Amino acid sequence: MRRRGQIVIIATLVIAILILSVAAMLYESATSYQRIRHEYISGLLDNINREFDKVLTYILASITQKYDGNTEIDAFQGDVYLKFDYWIKFLLRAFSSYDIQMDFTYPVLDLSWNSSNAYSSISARLAINMTKLGFYGWNRTSVILLNATILSVSSNSYLEINLTVNKEYGIPDEKLSEQSFTILYFNGSQWNEADILEFYNYGGGKYTIDVSRDLAGKPLEIWITDERGIIVELYYS
């Protein structure tokens, strides 16, 4: 009887261990599934997030390359809507298997040029649910910006123009080169391009451009094109 009791106890322990092992495996499987699912959704949203910025950057660059500083911005709003609407429809098709739901605002274009502090910007909001993945509530507002400010203009051996250039969220634009800048001067009858004699990139979005001191007192336009193709125009007189 004692031996039979021992066998029953051992069998019970073995069964308990098996049950615990199966439970642990099931828990690990569920945890792994949740982790993989989270990583998968995060990957999808990261891609959408990057493409959201890219499409706004593309729209702003394309509009500033057409803008002359004088045309009413409303003249470009139809083109803005058309490009953004095309991207939204692409998202709906690409993620239709996840029953994607989107709420958004069309991009707001803001171009303020012809001054010593000028900017080109665009912003939009996008909210996403993916019901088949059980994901709800992703919401983001994206702002794309190029801002430039003339800090000082002084005449010595050269006419020295000191300025600063920033991107969205106050990020300094440190990647500009001499080719990023075009200086125009007004000679009384027409605008002409000035030769850039010296160019300095000090980092932190700060630049110095030297042109002929003969341009002192003449109205100047400074056209800046960043590495994304976005343009802004400064004016100084």
Image (cartoon, grey):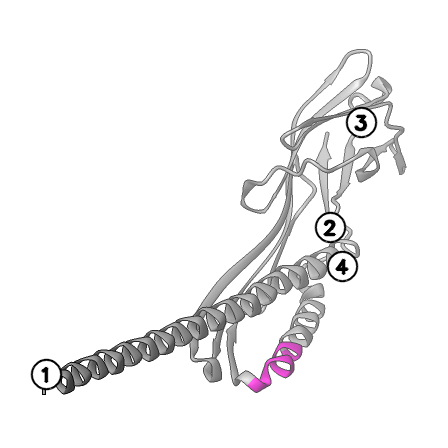
How packed is label 2: few (under 14 Cα within 10 Å), some, or many (20 or more)? Answer: few
| Secondary structure of the residue carrying numbered label 4 | helix
Disc marking residue 218: 3
Specify the amino acid type for callout 1: Arg
Where does label 1 land, which residue? 2
| Secondary structure of the residue carrying numbered label 3 | loop
Specify the amino acid type for callout 4: Ser
Q: On the rendered structure, is 25 left or right of 212?
A: left
Of circles 3 and 4, the one toward us is: 4
Return the x and y of residue 23 as percentages of the image width and height: 31, 78
Nearer to the camera, 147 or 55: 55
Q: On the rendered structure, is 196 left or right of 127?
A: right
Nearer to the camera, 102 or 44: 44
Where does label 2 land, which residue? 228
- Disc 4 versus disc 2: distance between alpha carbons? 10 Å
> Which image quarter: residue 90?
bottom right
Q: Earlier in the sequence, mark 3 or mark 4?
A: 4
Is there CB contact under 8 Å for labels 2 and 3? no
> Which image quarter: residue 50?
bottom right
Task: Report the residue at 42% width, 76% height from top.
Answer: 29
Q: Earlier in the sequence, mark 1 or mark 3?
A: 1
